[in-house]
Each structure stands twice: as C-alpha cells, then as structure tokens.
C-alpha cells in the first residue's frame, strides 16, 4: 500500500468515525420523514404518544443494556427476566390495590438479585458475559415454566393497569416512568463520578484497577441496573397488555442490544451515550411502525430486524478495524 | 549492497526524508539511528517498497532498482523484521518458517518431513536450537524472534532489516541475538539494524548512520565514535545535558517507605529496602528479574504472600490500589497503553482518574474544576495539546507519558513508583521527563524508578537496587553507580557477589 492509499484510508476512517456519530439521529429523522410522507397523521400528538408508549418498555431495557455494554458486557437475560418478573407479579393473585407496593418491591428486589448473580458470575467467576447471561436466561425460563406449568393464570390488581396504559394529566404513565429513569440514569452515566468509572472500566479494565477503581464492583452494578430496568419494564409491559404470558418481552434481549449498537454504543466497551442508545430503540420501533403503515405483514418486521442486525454487525466490524 | 541516492519523501506538510543518501555493504551490520520522527521508519519503508520515494534513486546489487510494492523488494532479497512479530501462534515453528512456501509432496499436500528437515537446517545455520514441531505460542519472545529471522533465510535474503529487535527481550537474550546476527553478517548478508539503545549499537554495529528531522547527519565507522558523540549527533546536544544534576537528599532517620521481607510469588522473593523522601531510588535488573512485579506487589495490584510495608511509620499490609492511592502512593506503569491511559477518554479525565472522589459533589462530577486541574498540569509539564478536552490517543509517546505524570503528581503525595518512565519516547522528551522526575524528588516525593536503560539509571538515580530472579542482589550508591557494577549484580550468582563494591544488603 503506498502512502496515498494509506492517507486515503486514514482520512476515510476518520470521516467514517465522524459519520457514525450521526448515523442514529439521521436515520431517526429520515424514518420520521418517511413515515410522515406515508401517513400525514403520523406527526399528530396522539400518534407520537402511541409510539412512545410502545417504545417505553424496550427503551427501559435499552437503558440498562447500555450500561452493561459500556463495561464490555452483554445481557441476554433481560427478556427472560421481563417475563419472569411479570409472572412473579401475578403470582400474588392480589386483587387489592394496596398490594401494589408489595408486588413492586418483591419483583424489583428479585430482579436486582438476578443482576447481582450475573455480575458476580462475570467478574468473580470470569464467565463470559454471553454464557453467564444466556445461562441465566434459560434458568429463569425453566423456573417460570415450572411454576406456570405452561399457562400463567395469576392476576393483578386493577390499579396495575395504570402503570402500563394509564395517563397522568394526559401523558401516558409508562412514558413518564421511562423519562424518570432516563433522567436518573442519564445523570448517573454522564454527570456522576460513577458514570466516569463506567467509562474508565469499559475503556480499559486494567487501568481502571490501577487507578484505584474497583472495576468488579462497577461491572456488577451495571448488571444490577440492567436487571432492574428489565424487571420494571416487565411490570410495565404486563400492565400495558393486561394479561401475563410466558413470553412477555420476547426478543427484547436482541432488540435492546441492536438498539444500543445502532445508537453508537461500542460493543467492546467504553464508548457511547445513553441518548444514543434510546435513539437506537426509537429507530427500531419506528421501523416496525412503518411496516404496519405500509400494510406489510407483521412478519416483515422480523425480516427488517434481521437486515438491521446484519447492517449493525457490519458497522461493528468496521469500528473494530478503525 | 544497497545504495540510496538523494532520496526524498514528502507527506502533506512534512518532508519526511530530505535528500538522504545512504549505503550499506554486504557483510556489515549497519545501525540506523535517530529520534522518533527522524525518518528511520520512512527510510525502511522506502527500502522495503512500501513507500515510493518522490525523488532519488535506489541501487541494489549495483543495479538501479525501483520497487512498486513490498513483494518486489522481497523477491529481490530484502527481508524486514518488524518490531511487532507476525507469527501464527497456533502453528508450529516449521509451519511459521515456511508460511506460504511449504514444500509439497506430489499429491499437493504439505511435505511435513521435508519441511521439518529444512526448518532444522535453517535453524542450524543460525546456530539456534528449538523444536521445529513446537507451537510458536509455547516459545518465549526471544525464540519467536529467531523464528522470524529463520523466515528470512527460507529464500535468498541479501539484505535483512531489523527494527528494534531488542525492545522486547532481555539483556542475555539480546546477546544471543547479536551472536546470531553476526553469524549472518559473516555469511555476507547485509544487515540494517535500528535501535534506540546506544549500548547495543556499540556491541553490534560496524557502521552507524544517524538521521535527524529527515536529514542525513552522518555515516561513520563505529570505532570513530564514542557514546557522547553519538547522542550529540542524534539530539544535537551533549550527553551531560541530558540528565539534570543529581541531588542527594540529607540523611533522614525515618524512611518514607520501609519494606521488609516482602514476598509475592512467583517473582518477588524476600525483598527488603528503605526509601527516603527526596531520593530517586533506581531498581535495575534484567527483564524478568521481578522488578515490575515488586512494584505491583507494593502498590497492591498483585497479592503478597508475606512481608510488611510501612509508609510514614504506619504499617499497611493488605493493600489495594485504592488504599495505596489514598495513602499517597502513585504508580506509573510500564505499559502506557495497556495499563495506563484510557484511550477513549480526554486528557482531563485521564488526569483525574485516581482521585475522582475529590471531584465529586452532590450534583455530580465537577467538570469545571477537573478541566482547570488538567489545564494546570498541561501547563506545568508543557504537554503539547490543543485543550484539556482533546483525546490522548493521538498524542506522541512523550506527551502521553507527561499526561500520566500529570495524573500521578495530582494524586500522589508521598511515593511515586515509575516503571520504565521513558520507554519508547524520543530523546528530547526523555530529557524533559528526567527534569520532571528530578523536580518531583526535590519537592519531597520518594521516587522508586524501575528502568532497563542503564544509562538513565546511572544518569539520574541517587541510589540503586539491583534485582535478579526475584531477589535484591545488590545496592549501590554514589560513585559506585556505574554500569559495570550494576550489570555484575544483575547477572552473576549471588554467592560471588562478595567483592564488596558498595553491597549493603539489607537483611
């Protein structure tokens, strides 16, 4: 390779890196434009609210997944945990709204424990994140199936519906929940010193230890955050749908990872923003919406999702090379 | 053998080579010297065909030659061994030697029998014996390097270029390497040898060419030169101007750091010493003597099995890096990129990392103060960067090292451990780093400095400990700090270290 091509390649990779920052917002904007062209009512407040309501459960999971990916991890157990959290919530068979705080507390503590185990496996036992969380996914699934015997039958207090489908001064409650966590976690990641520790640990775990950061603790907390978000998302989704089944949140493990990568979070850790990850989630949801607007069969969503993953994988391998 | 005539190579904004003429003969080891950015790599790339010169002519074997690709140069008999070895770890030695050129049976399969035989022949020629069927990953770095050299002997190599081959191997291994190189030289191979280390230039090179800022300074026979002249040619200044004047601290009663019988298996064995405030205590020894491990054990980044460490008369025996930092220790590691800098973060974040809690307020991280501290350090150490918000990955080695000094001088109050603080940076930056280290000691820090470069150990340390195979085998002070004494402790059996030259072994 002569110097001209070397320089070209260098220039191209720099340009490529500059471009990757804008891929998510630009694709989001173009998707919105496409959707508006196809269906002028797309930009109506009602429709936007509908879409955000649909996006909220995934976006919540993405918030947690982003933390895990930033510390070079991966959480495949989120979807299975969502369903398990939902089943656990209905297991109380509660009818009184007074039980809601108890249900909440128990589910969230249980979710946090799942994250703790994931984190301990990855850090203290050196299990690869892929295998540890895959195993967790299967174990949770097994426990859930064993308990429900294949047909979940529990029920939730009526007040629970508010969480998933209710409105507070006209704004969907689940959207509010999402924004609440988006701000809390956004502050945590981008403004607090814990967030800095996340970036240092993800960027260079060895250096992290040598500057006195307990990298293991940081990683474990990230897995706990991911599981917490998955648990909360599961509760919201079950409140939205109104009934529980064994597959609440099915496919969200892949969707959340794809959303993160689409949003510019590097799979080898240490780079990316929460804002980017949420943009990634919106892109996915919009894609699915456009499929509906176009009147295509729902199955087309899967095909498009597959194509996006291939595209994202291509992006990923290029980002490694550069 | 090869003659370059008036070679120029221009990159946008830089004249990387400016009318350089250079000639190397068959049967000589020709050293190519210069600071980082002097044009050595560009010159090598011109020779290897990776770069096409903008001006000038190359004569190879008396013929005017023009290569348009590395393959052309390789076919002509030029073989380059880069610093980073390109071996396939899961393949055997023989397979690596014959990579892409394996002898075939008439079925078209690899003729392993012939390959092993020929691989052994080649290694015999080098006088180096390793199992040709062993996997490369099972070899040490020095043996892997021999495999690289063996690869050069598969075809007919007339010119062999070695780019900093001793950067990764120890002193003893380097001596073996030099013997092998001399063997090839005596067979009539022309060898161009690039290195930062002056000592070895004198033991291996026949002639030396020095480049500076893309220009040829001179080509001389090695016997015409001494080390000071050579450094003078490289940096344009005298060796005595490289190191700041030593300043021996006044004798104190209590050491800032006292270590007794420290063990950290498998590399650190029964180490005891004192470190006083204001002193620069060197730790010399061969690579693998356990020096870095000692530093890690002190700092708490590898576990200790026994022994006591006392800092300011306070014992702390179950340290972690966190606790060490909180007590006033700092540790600048040898692997700048792997264990030091966070390449994805900016300079201010790199500087504040060990003392993040100092910057933490109720509302989060105090970015403004963080940036201010970074600005102060950039100013203090004259780091050449546009702003505290710039990334560290694009900085030169010297500036990256200064960022790390900025980090640890912010965090560290009592003892600063430096592991190879000038590795891979050019002489100009080294001089600045030496001044910084001297200044820090004057300001009252106790400095523990590990280095494989004897020149700088001798040039800057006020006391030196020598390690060998995990033990401290000698301690030298004052006028005894000379290379010969240090090398003797670093290499001989401990039994014979009784000559009494300043050996105050702490028991």
Image (spheres, coloured by chain):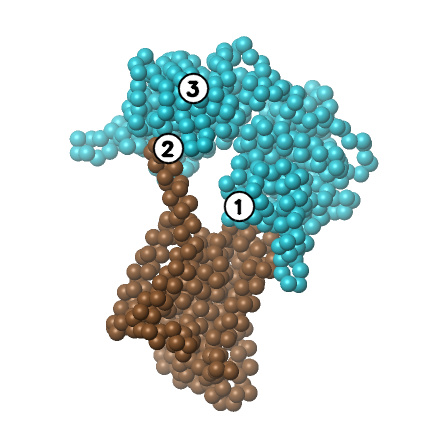
Chain colours: A brown, B cyan
> Answer yes or no: do the residues labelled 2 and 1 have beta carbons within 8 Å?
no
SS at mark 1 in the image = loop
Write down the residue under mark 1. Answer: B391
Q: For residue B121, which quarter of the picture?
A: top left
Please tell me how many numbered marks the rendered image carries.
3
> Answer yes or no: do the residues labelled 2 and 3 have beta carbons within 8 Å?
no
Residue in the picture at 31% in, 69% down: A37
* In the displayed structure image, the side of residue A314 where residue B13 appears, left or right: right
Write down the residue under mark 2. Answer: A3
Write down the residue under mark 3. Answer: B19
Label 3 and label 1: CA atoms lie apart by: 35 Å
Q: Is residue B313 above or below residue A110?
A: above
Q: Give coordinates of residue A217: x percent, y percent.
A: 57, 58
Tell me whether marks 2 and 3 sit on the same chain: no
In this view, which residue lies farthest toward the right?
B253
Structural crowding at the residue carrying mark 2, measured as other residues with C-alpha within 10 Å and reported as few (<14), some (14–19) or many (≥20): few
């Amino acid at each position: 390779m002569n110097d001209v091509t070397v320089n070209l390649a260098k220039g191209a990779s720099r340009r490529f890196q500059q471009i990757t920052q804008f891929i998510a917002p630009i694709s989001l904007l173009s998707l919105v434009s496409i959707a508006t062209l196809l269906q002028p009512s797309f930009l109506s407040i009602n429709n936007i609210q509908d879409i955000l309501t649909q996006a909220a459960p995934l976006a919540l999971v993405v918030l947690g997944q982003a933390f895990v990916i930033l510390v070079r991890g991966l959480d495949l157990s989120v979807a299975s945990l969502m369903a398990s959290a939902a089943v656990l919530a209905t297991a109380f068979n509660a009818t009184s709204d007074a039980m809601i705080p108890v249900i909440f507390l128990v589910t969230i503590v249980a979710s946090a424990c799942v994250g703790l185990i994931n984190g301990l496996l990855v850090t203290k036992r050196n299990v690869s994140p892929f295998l540890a969380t895959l195993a967790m996914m299967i174990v949770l699934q097994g426990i859930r199936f064993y308990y429900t015997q294949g047909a979940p039958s529990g029920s939730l207090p009526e007040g629970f519906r508010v969480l998933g489908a209710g409105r507070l001064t006209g704004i969907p409650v689940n959207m509010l929940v999402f924004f609440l966590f988006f701000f809390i976690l956004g502050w945590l990641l981008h403004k607090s010193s814990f967030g800095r520790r996340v970036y240092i640990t993800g960027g260079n775990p060895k250096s992290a230890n040598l500057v006195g950061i307990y990298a293991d603790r940081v990683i474990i907390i990230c897995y706990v955050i991911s599981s917490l978000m998955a648990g909360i998302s599961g509760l919201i989704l079950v409140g939205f749908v109104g009934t529980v089944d064994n597959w609440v949140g099915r496919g969200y493990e892949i969707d959340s990872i794809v959303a993160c990568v689409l949003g510019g979070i590097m799979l080898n850790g240490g780079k990316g923003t929460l804002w980017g990850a949420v943009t990634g989630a919106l892109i996915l949801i919009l894609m699915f919406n456009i499929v509906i607007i176009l009147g295509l069969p729902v199955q087309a969503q899967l095909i498009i999702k597959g194509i996006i993953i291939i595209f994202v994988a291509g992006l990923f391998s290029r980002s490694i090379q550069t | 053998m090869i003659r370059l005539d008036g070679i120029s190579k221009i990159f946008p904004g830089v004249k990387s080579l400016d009318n350089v003429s250079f000639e190397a003969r068959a049967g000589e080891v020709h050293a190519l010297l210069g600071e980082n950015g002097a044009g050595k790599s560009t010159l090598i790339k011109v020779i290897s065909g990776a770069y096409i010169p903008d001006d000038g002519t190359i004569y190879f074997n008396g013929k005017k030659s023009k290569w348009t690709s590395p393959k052309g140069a390789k076919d002509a008999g030029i073989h380059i061994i880069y610093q980073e070895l390109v071996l396939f770890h899961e393949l055997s030695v023989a397979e690596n030697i014959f990579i892409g050129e394996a002898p075939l049976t008439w079925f078209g399969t690899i003729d392993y029998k012939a390959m092993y035989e020929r691989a052994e022949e080649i290694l015999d020629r080098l006088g180096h014996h390793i199992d040709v069927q062993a996997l490369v990953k099972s070899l040490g770095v020095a043996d892997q390097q021999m495999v690289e050299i063996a690869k050069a002997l598969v075809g007919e190599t007339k010119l062999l270029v070695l780019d900093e081959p001793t950067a990764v191997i120890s002193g003893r291994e380097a001596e073996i390497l030099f013997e092998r190189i001399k063997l090839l030289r005596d067979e009539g191979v022309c060898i161009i040898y690039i290195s930062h280390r002056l000592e070895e230039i004198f033991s291996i090179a026949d002639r030396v060419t020095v480049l500076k800022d893309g220009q040829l300074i001179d080509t001389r026979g090695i016997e015409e030169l001494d080390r000071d002249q050579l450094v003078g040619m490289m940096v344009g200044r005298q060796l005595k101007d490289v190191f700041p004047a030593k300043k021996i601290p006044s004798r104190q009663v209590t050491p800032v750091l006292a270590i007794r019988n420290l063990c950290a298996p498998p590399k650190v064995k029964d180490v005891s010493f004192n470190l006083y405030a204001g002193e620069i205590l060197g730790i010399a020894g061969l690579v693998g003597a356990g020096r870095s491990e000692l530093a890690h054990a002190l700092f708490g980044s590898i576990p200790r099995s026994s022994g006591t460490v006392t800092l300011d008369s306070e014992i702390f025996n179950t340290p972690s890096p966190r606790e060490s930092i909180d007590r006033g220790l700092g540790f600048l590691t040898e692997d700048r990129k792997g264990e030091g800098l966070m390449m994805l973060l900016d300079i201010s974040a790199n500087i504040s990392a060990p003392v993040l809690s100092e910057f933490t307020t109720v509302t989060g991280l105090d970015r403004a103060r963080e940036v201010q501290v970074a600005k102060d350090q950039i100013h203090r150490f004259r780091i050449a960067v546009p702003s505290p918000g710039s990334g560290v990955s694009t900085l030169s080695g010297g500036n990256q090292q200064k960022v790390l000094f900025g980090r640890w001088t912010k965090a560290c109050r009592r003892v600063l451990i430096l592991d190879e603080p000038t590795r891979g940076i050019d002489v100009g930056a080294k001089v600045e780093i030496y001044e910084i280290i001297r200044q820090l000691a004057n300001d009252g820090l106790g400095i523990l400095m590990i280095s494989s470069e004897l020149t700088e150990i001798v040039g800057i340390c006020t006391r030196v400990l020598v390690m060998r195979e995990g033990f401290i085998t000698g301690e030298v002070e004052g006028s005894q700090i000379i290379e010969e004494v240090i090398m003797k402790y670093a290499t001989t059996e401990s039994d014979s270290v009784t000559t009494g030259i300043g050996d105050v072994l702490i028991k």
